[in-house]
Amino acid sequence: MKLLQRSLVARISASLLAISAMALISIVVTMMVANGSRGDAAAINVAGSLRMNTYQIVAALQRYQSEPAPVHRERVQALSERFHERLASPRLTAALPVADDHPLREQYRLLQTRWEDSLAPQVIRAIAGGGLEVEALRQTLDGLVGDIDQMVTRLEENSEAKIRLLSALQILFLLLTAVVVAIALYDIRHNLVGPLHQLVVLAREAGRRNFSHRTRLSGSDELALLGNTLNTMAAELGESYAELEARVSRKKQELARSNEAMQILHDGSRALYGGGNDLCASAAPMLRRLEALLGIGPIGLSLHDPYDQREVSILATHSPSRPTYCRNHDCHACLIDPQPLELSEDEESECLMLPVSVGETLLGTLEVWYPTAQPLSASTRRLLFTLSDQLATAVFLQRRIEEEQQVTLMNERTIIARELHDSLAQSLSYLKMQVARLERMQVKEMPRETQAPVFDELRTGLDSAYRQLRELLTTFRLRLDGPGLSSALRQTTEEFGERLGFPVELYVDVPPHLLNPNEEIHVLQVVREALANVHKHARAHWAAVTVRFAEARLEVMIEDDGIGLETQDSPPMHYGLVIMRDRADTLGGDFQVRNRDAGGTLVAIVFTPQTARLIAQQPAEPPVKLQPVNRDPAG
């Protein structure tokens, strides 16, 4: 019983088993009753035939009395034996109940007694010739027929009783089956259909994200247990969903804050990398915006001094005074703070120290203060690390720019000093020697004619020195006014085009930042010296300058259509050619001066730039004889 109370499946199974058992019992009982009624019809027929057989015996006896012939006697005997056989026939006796006190069994015994005690003796006496008493025979016949009728009636009643029993049993089992089915349907309706409907509603509401709905199931069966479990699960899902929604909301806020912080960092990077050398003015607004967004602060930036190994504070937000080593007192970025951030005495705070470094080089430290009650999240820490890397990059680039400026300044000074030494200083030294020579000649009171060549050499040297000084001044002005070799060459060709009276063609095919400043100065000076020679000696009507980079070598060619050289060998003592050859040797290249096939002169330098030499790391190729490009209008 406890199992049936606890298990709906057990109750349904018990109902099905009960229905099946009653159906089986009904079938077995029906078969038994039907089997018990199998010989009833035959018994009724036999009993009915006994009545006819009685009338036949009486009629045969009467015929035998009127005509006592052997045939009629044999007829009487045969009918008597047939009656006896039918009375004792198994078809009749098998239909009789087994119980001796059954009315049908008693009626059979009465019929058998009346036959043996009344009619059979009369038949035997009549056959034996004792005569026949008609009145007595009629009375016996009426009594026997009445007993036979009673026997038939009892047999019919017995068969009808079996049929009624079978009908009653069928009705009984049908009622029992209906009761079991009704109980099962009631149980299914109240303990299966209803709970299932509540569970479906709960599942539908859960699918709609309504986790407040609950089932109202009581009991200890499977569906009640499932309903209680689903109630618990719905409650847990509601809590989990609410927690997840809260987490998603927090994540959205963090993402929005991170997005805004990244935008601040992006805007700050533009200010940092484009703000020149003023790190405080470019970084302070960004730091204050990050403090207001992330709820942190104050933030301080200190740079590491590699020379005396100390930290120098250069920036601090929410500071009432300037940093100690402030370099620009016209800047008020650190002091612009309408609401200074002050931590109360009761509020505890912590400091996060972040290294401002590039690789293994420590550039400084970033101090970030925040309330202890509001610890920094992982995303905020990542943003702060990004901020420190951004500041490190800005500081590193600033230092590199300063170093580059210093290196550039030193290179410019070195180039100017070398140019002055190679040109003007040598000329002045030569003039100084000539002055000393002239002083000795005057001390010896040599004649005027002897001193005249010295005066001519002094005049020529001064003109040459003045010309070199102008060339140097022009070159350095070009270098300062137009950055890059292409711009300087364009100004140079325009200048000499005005001197020559016709435009000088220029073809430049050089990648940017290929030459260092020293190489650019040498190339520019060679071009200017060659164009100066064209202006002085060539008597040309066309000139062109070609500078191109091919196969890791720079080719510089200056061509004209003038009178050319007297021989293929350049004059050994020509001062300008010597200077150009010295510059080519300084560049580690080849220098050529020869006549063009189309007429005129070709001056060419071929060398491997320092940057290409560092990249290629390959042995220099043998000198190549350059073929000038035929751009002569006459050619």
Image (cartoon, rainbow, N blue to C red):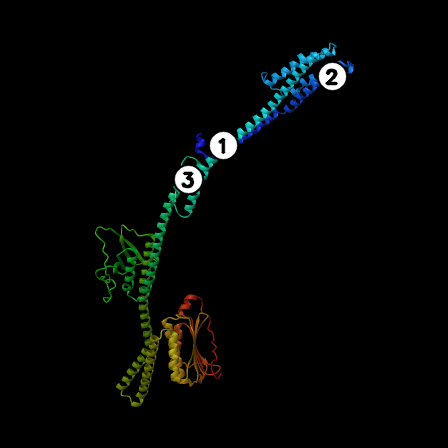
Left or right relative to 456: residue 55 = right
User: What residue is rendered at 42% in x and 41% in y?
Assistant: 198
Q: Which mark is residue 227?
A: 3
Q: Where residue 284 appears, x then y in whole percent? A: 27, 62
Residue 56 appears anywhere in the view: yes
Inspect the image, locate mark 3, and give the three-letter code of the amino acid beneath it: Gly
Q: Badges 3 and 1: C-beta atoms under 8 Å apart? A: no
Sequence-wise, which precedes: disc 1 or disc 2?
Answer: 2
Inspect the image, locate mark 1, and give the three-letter code of the amino acid beneath it: Val
Nearest-to-viewer mark from 3 and 1: 1
Inspect the image, locate mark 2, and give the three-letter code of the amino acid beneath it: Ala
C-alpha distance separating marks 2 and 3: 92 Å
Secondary structure of the residue carrying tag 1 is: helix
Residue sitting nearer the eye, 590 or 510: 510
Above or below: residue 317 compared with residue 130: below
- Give neighbour class at mark 3: few <14, some 14-19, many 20+ (Cα, 10 Å): many
Question: Given the current orientation, which residue lies at the most extreme front position?
Answer: 135
Nearest-to-viewer mark from 2 and 3: 2
User: What residue is rendered at 29% in x and 81% in y?
Assistant: 432
For mark 1, what is the residue? 180
User: What residue is rendered at 42% in x and 39% in y?
Assistant: 226
Residue sitting nearer the eye, 438 or 430: 430
- Give neighbour class at mark 1: few <14, some 14-19, many 20+ (Cα, 10 Å): some
Question: Quadrant of the image for the N terminus?
Answer: top left
